[in-house]
């Protein structure tokens, strides 16, 4: 047998260390990582018969977030990736669901977002759009909340007690009008059937005294558009590109929305034009900066405050609704 000299022991130790580091770098952990992506122009994704995208130096951009399983090394040292955020698996894939189900739900949310964005843009362009709100669509269920295990993503809440629910605002009003701890009888449309569940509201940890059931909802609606509008976003999912889609559609319908500037936008848009908060603001802000765009429209409130923390010279424009976004873009000055 060959004698293990100190130099050979050191070499063996370095080899084993390299194997361990490589394994930690490759093997997926039980957590997920959010990473910045560059902003992408909306115009190439949109088709309106008889319309062509403007050919100026501007354009509306949307921005996505890379979401994947974190390796063990990324989980242990998240700072290795610039702009990364590591989150527990339950924050991305709720217990009882699968990665495949999550991706399918994200694609469905993207499709709904496109329909609503088209309705908002066409209305702003003067077209008559038939859009009937049909309930509060469950996008996500908070783990450990009263709704966990009883409501599921893609459920449509249509009634709370005797009150008809047509919009997310209806749902918030129905829940907040009763004290914390109230037993609520909730009717949901799941697939082609109606189901009734009972649960007690809980105290919102963020707002003292406000009752919640622990769901993230968006607008469910029956929409009939006067024009054929197609948006091909590929594998991008989720509702957060709604504002960007609506702005670009209006541009292609003949309104000068960007005024010759490159504009990035994020935010879920509702049928009434209101802009709702979204996730991944840190990564999206960094992604916009990486693309070299100088203006970023984001939902007002917490989203705007978070975006400013990572702006580093990027102009953050908080907006509450579609009309406010249009007004903000019309008054932009000194944008390079």
Image: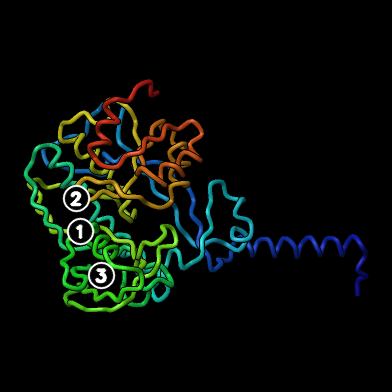
**Residue 335 vs residue 320, the one in the foreground:** 320
Dot label at residue 51: none
How many marks do you count on the picture?
A: 3
Q: Position of residue 244 (x, y in %)?
A: 29, 42
Q: CA distance from mark 1 to mark 3?
A: 14 Å
The residue that disc 3 covers is 155
The residue that disc 2 covers is 271
* Quadrant including the C terminus: top left
Mark 3: few/some/many CA within 10 Å (<14, 14-19, 20+): many
Dot label at residue 167: 1
Residue contact between numbered discs 2 and 3, judged by CB atoms under 8 Å: no
Is any part of residue 190 visible from this angle? Answer: no
The answer to which of marks 1 and 3 sits earlier in the sequence is 3
Residue at 37%, 69% in the rendered image: 100
Which mark is nearer the camera, 2 or 1? 1
**Residue 156 vs residue 18, the one in the foreground:** 156
Residue contact between numbered discs 2 and 1, judged by CB atoms under 8 Å: yes
Is any part of residue 242 visible from this angle? Answer: yes
């Amino acid at each position: 047998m060959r004698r293990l000299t100190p130099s050979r022991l050191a070499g063996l130790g370095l080899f084993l260390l390299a194997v361990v580091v490589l394994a930690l770098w490759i093997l997926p952990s039980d957590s997920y990582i959010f990473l910045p992506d560059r902003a992408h122009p909306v115009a190439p994704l949109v088709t309106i018969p008889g319309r062509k995208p403007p050919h100026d130096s501007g354009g509306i951009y949307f921005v996505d977030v890379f979401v994947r399983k974190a390796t063990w090394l990324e989980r242990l040292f998240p700072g290795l990736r610039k702009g990364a955020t590591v989150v527990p698996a339950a924050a991305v894939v709720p217990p009882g669901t699968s990665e495949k189900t999550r991706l399918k739900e994200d694609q469905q949310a993207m499709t709904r977002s496109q329909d609503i964005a088209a309705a908002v843009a066409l209305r702003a362009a003067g077209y008559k759009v038939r859009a009937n709100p049909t309930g509060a669509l469950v996008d996500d269920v908070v783990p450990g909340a009263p709704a966990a295990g009883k409501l599921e993503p893609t459920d449509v809440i249509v009634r709370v007690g005797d009150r008809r629910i047509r919009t997310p605002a209806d749902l918030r009003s129905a829940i907040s009008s009763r004290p914390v701890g109230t037993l609520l009888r909730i009717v949901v449309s799941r697939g082609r059937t109606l189901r009734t569940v009972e649960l007690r509201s809980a105290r919102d940890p963020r707002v003292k005294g406000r009752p919640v059931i622990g769901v993230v909802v968006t607008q469910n609606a029956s929409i009939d558009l006067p024009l054929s509008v197609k948006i091909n976003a590929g594998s991008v999912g989720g509702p957060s590109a709604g504002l960007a889609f609506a702005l670009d559609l209006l541009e292609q319908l003949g309104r000068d929305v960007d005024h010759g500037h490159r504009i990035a936008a994020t935010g879920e848009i509702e049928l009434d034009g209101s802009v709702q908060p979204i996730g991944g603001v840190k990564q999206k802000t960094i992604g916009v900066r990486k693309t070299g765009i100088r203006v970023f429209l984001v939902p007002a409130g917490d989203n705007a405050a978070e975006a400013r923390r990572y702006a580093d010279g990027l102009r953050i424009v908080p907006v509450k609704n579609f009309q406010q976004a249009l007004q903000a873009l019309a008054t932009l000055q000194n944008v390079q």
